Image (spheres, coloured by chain):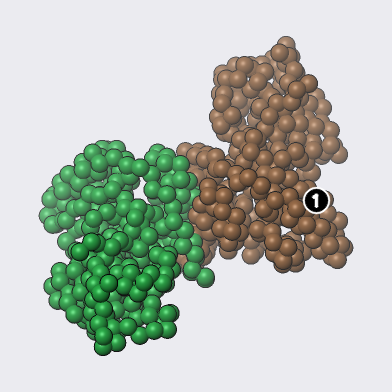
Chain colours: A brown, B green
Amino acid sequence: MKQVTAFAPATVANVSCGFDILGFAIDELGDRVRINLSDNGELKVKEITGDDGRLPVEVDKNTCSVAIQAMLDALGIKQGMDIHLYKGLPLGSGMGSSAASAAAALVAANELLGKPFEKKDLVPFAMEAERIACGAAHADNVAPSILGGFVLIRGYDPLDVVKLPVPDGLYCTLVHPHLELKTADSRSVLRQRISLKESVVQSGNIAGLIAGLFQSDFELISRSLKDVIAEPSRALLIPGFYELREAIRSIGALGSGISGSGPTIFILSKGKDIALKASQESEKVFEKIGLGVDIYVSEVNDRGAYLQTP
Amino acid sequence: MKQVTAFAPATVANVSCGFDILGFAIDELGDRVRINLSDNGELKVKEITGDDGRLPVEVDKNTCSVAIQAMLDALGIKQGMDIHLYKGLPLGSGMGSSAASAAAALVAANELLGKPFEKKDLVPFAMEAERIACGAAHADNVAPSILGGFVLIRGYDPLDVVKLPVPDGLYCTLVHPHLELKTADSRSVLRQRISLKESVVQSGNIAGLIAGLFQSDFELISRSLKDVIAEPSRALLIPGFYELREAIRSIGALGSGISGSGPTIFILSKGKDIALKASQESEKVFEKIGLGVDIYVSEVNDRGAYLQTP
């Protein structure tokens, strides 16, 4: 086998009360990476489409090549590869764009190398790509993009990745307003100290969300989707956030939150009908504000990154 | 039916990373309450044994009568009852002593009244008893004492009680050192503000613990049993705490923590053998310190409070 293409999905990290520890994957929307083995022993980023020329092609800066290099280093081998990245995700949107590129690259490269790694073992290599792209080796986008479904990052010392079940019929509406929000700005508005009480409330909600996922208890999931720590600061950077929250509650959606560090907003719903209604409500809210949006409706993806037949 | 006796188990609240939101019930060890209907329309605490005369018999101060009164008020009825409380739990030990009395009283009284309430509906009445006994209407002891197993208190506004599964073979060793620790003192050492980072670590651990309970993943439970918020302050009040933690790790126990606000220490183990070894290790540690201890080994109780046949 000399050529393989893999797809990796968009992801929502910082799932409300799951701030910094939880992420989940979206179906269909994502990045594709094609890799050809080459004989010159070098990694090369040969082609990038869909990025308007904004992504670096340097091997030590591109998330695909950085992730693959980390993998090759772990194996202690050299292997030439030509990388073709087809971006399906907008950059800097809070939908795990850099993570999806790294995840697809790793799944393709792993296949070409004869599958030396289980999918779960690819996560640390993708984290190296995140370190380059975002300045921090977070796993809450890369892990769900690789593994699919909801993924808990229990801790980093050592890395502890726990795949969680996805209730049947859980849909996500992703609302991407056309404005750019730098991760650094989103980080800077966070309070560095919080009250004990707030921490207890957050703990109760994340515990409820995890239990709700295991029990397919949509009501419990809905009651638990509250972030008292990051969202109150960050939502102020996203026009329409609270208006949209009001609107989607009234149509029976489970809840909403900021995807990653924003500006994308995720809305969870039981069933596709409500997810589509949430999409219509989102259009209305942002039309009123006068801000363009892209909206995606998708079941929560439970398979993660996968190979595509040629 | 004119007379009913109920048993309610000891409980461990503040389960490590489950500070203020999680509790579980112990088998066998607990309080018994016998109630006889009376015709005079009054609640009376007729008898208390096992408390060395320390518990109040006044109807507005005793946790049994306060809980039952809250229940009668909710029903809008008057009913005379004579209450007999047989304490099996030491007072002020951090094993949910006041909660067990209230739970047993409520289960017995509910039966005598023809079961107007589901077990879960009894929790708010027991919380009124906690308000009298501890100054705060906490549910993390009363809910597991009534319902059994692990119980999450997701939040209080409104009360949201979620029963969680108990993995087969999960044992608890309760170590009660002979020293008294006032709840108020245990509260006063808590830091009222914590770092964002600590809150994220705590969230990751409670999420891992909940997932571990659902998946019967003892390793994950073990990795998650870490409290970075309350324990570092409170453990200093309990001699032997860290020595015991070291000792029980070496014999393969899952982890340990402070039961309630202490001084009792709980140790979780997979299987009875390790729980018994943990008991032996506890004896050694406290013998070295020169402090007497009572030690109980028990499976985690999954049935909660129950009626006893006469």
Query: Which of the pair A34/A124 is nearer the observer?
Result: A34
Q: Is residue A16 above or below residue A12?
A: below
| Residue furthest to the front | B1
Q: Which residue is mark 1?
A: A295
**Mark 1 falls on what kind of element?**
strand
Disc 1 residue type?
Ile
Percent of width and height locating residue A113: 64, 17
Q: Is residue A101 left or right of residue B264?
A: right
Q: Is residue B194 left or right of residue A34?
A: left
Image quarter where the N terminus of chain B lies is: bottom left
At horizontal 58% and vertical 61% (from top left) the residue drawn is A223
Image quarter where the C terminus of chain B lies is: bottom left
At horizontal 86% and vertical 56% (from top left) the residue drawn is A292
Q: Is residue B221 above or below residue B134?
A: above
Percent of width and height locating residue A199: 50, 61
At horizontal 46% and vertical 41% (from top left) the residue drawn is B215
Percent of width and height locating residue B9: 28, 60
Chain for numbered disc 1: A
Q: Is residue B131 left or right of residue A96?
A: left
Query: Which of the pair A295/B284 is nearer the observer?
Result: A295
Q: Is residue A95 above or below residue B92?
A: above
